[in-house]
Amino acid sequence: MTHRTIVTNKELFRFGIKTDDECLHCGDKDSIEHSFIECVFTKMFIQNVLDWFTRVNMCPIPSTTEETLFGITASTLDTTIIRKFNYTTLFRRHYIYSSKLNSLAISIQEFISKLLIKYDLEIFFNRMSYSVKSTPPSSTQYRV
């Protein structure tokens, strides 16, 4: 995202691929900043994800723009919560981008369903990688 490798309607319009440069969700001018920070629908979606994460993990998460975009790098929070939040943040960005790319609405219910599958896969693959070792990772590392 920081290297402008993500294509939005702004770029697609400029290259003649789209007929306009409007955001799929709100109709404002689309851009990387708009897609991930400024769009009203994205803001509501991010807040819903943060509220859900806080509720299910019983842990308030800081919500600065930097942490919302890039995850938590330094904190007094438990490292498992930080990893889980950063994983959720990465998947949330992917979900927003792929939804816009495929002209789909963003849905908190669909996002959570897909994220829980991702959590389960992480647990499975972590167990697989530890099958040679003596102690498997905690099954609650990613699962809510």
Image (spheres, grey):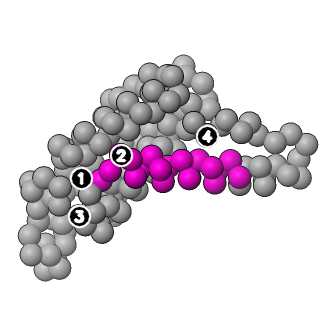
| Circle 3 residue | 8
Does residue 17 appear left or right of residue 53 in this picture? left
| Circle 2 residue | 108
Dot 2: within a 10 Å radius of its alpha carbon, few (fewer than 14), some, or many (20 or more) residues? some
| Circle 1 residue | 35
Q: Return the residue nearer the eye: 142 or 15.
A: 142
Are dots 3 and 1 in contact, CB under 8 Å?
yes
Q: Name the kind of residue labelled 3 in the image.
A: Thr
Between disc 4 and disc 1, the foreground one is 4
Q: Name the kind of residue labelled 4 in the image.
A: Tyr
Mark 2 and mark 3: span between their CA atoms?
21 Å
- Where is the C terminus found, in terms of image quarters? top right
Mark 3 and mark 4: span between their CA atoms?
31 Å
Q: Return the residue nearer the eye: 89 or 140.
A: 140
| Circle 4 residue | 142
Dot 1: within a 10 Å radius of its alpha carbon, few (fewer than 14), some, or many (20 or more) residues? many
